[in-house]
Image (cartoon, helix red, strand yellow):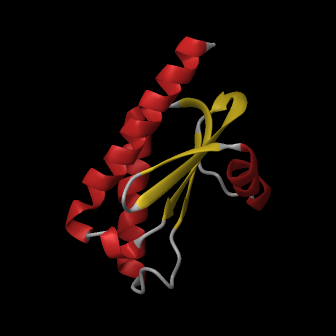
Amino acid sequence: MRLNNPQDFKRCFQNGKRVKNRAFVLHFVKNGGLPARFGVNIAKSKIKKAVERNKIKRVAREAFRRKHLEGLDIVLILRNEKNFNQSECSILINEVFDSLKKNELLTNKNN
């Protein structure tokens, strides 16, 4: 499912946790047991061409689908376009999702 509502994005930013790598930040917050929802925010000022922005979004949505996450609202943001390389797009996105999985496993063990 997709995260479309601006209030949901705001809730992820204000109340959630985050994981990051050299190019992306992943904000996430628990959504009360609902199916996981995912939103992507890539600024036009960072990636000028719409084709490249859409490619990142497609790769990110596919990575999200393959991770089988439950009970989270997640927002992916491109934070540093200088460290982003189109050829490494899927590697960087999978890396940040793997960090999220590890973080979730650690918090679930502690609870």
- Residue depicted at x 51% and y 82%: 44
Q: Where is residue 96 in the image (x, y as percent from the top left)?
A: 39, 46
Q: Position of residue 41 (x, y in %)?
A: 55, 65
Give above or below for 54 relative to 71.
Answer: below
- Residue depicted at x 49% and y 30%: 103
- Residue depicted at x 60% and y 50%: 2
- Residue depicted at x 43% and y 62%: 57
* Relative to 92, 75 lies left or right: right
Residue extending farthest to the left is: 87
Nearer to the camera, 47 or 54: 47
Residue extending farthest to the right is: 7
Find residue 13 and report its image quarter.
bottom right
Quadrant where the image shows the C terminus: top right
Q: Can residue 68 be seen in this view?
A: no
Give above or below for 24 relative to 33.
Answer: below
Quadrant where the image shows the N terminus: top right
Find residue 86 and report its image quarter.
bottom left
* Relative to 60, 73 lies left or right: right
Q: Position of residue 8 (x, y in %)?
A: 74, 51
Q: Is residue 54 visible?
A: yes
The number of discs equals 0
* Relative to 4, 68 lies left or right: left
* Relative to 13, 54 lies left or right: left
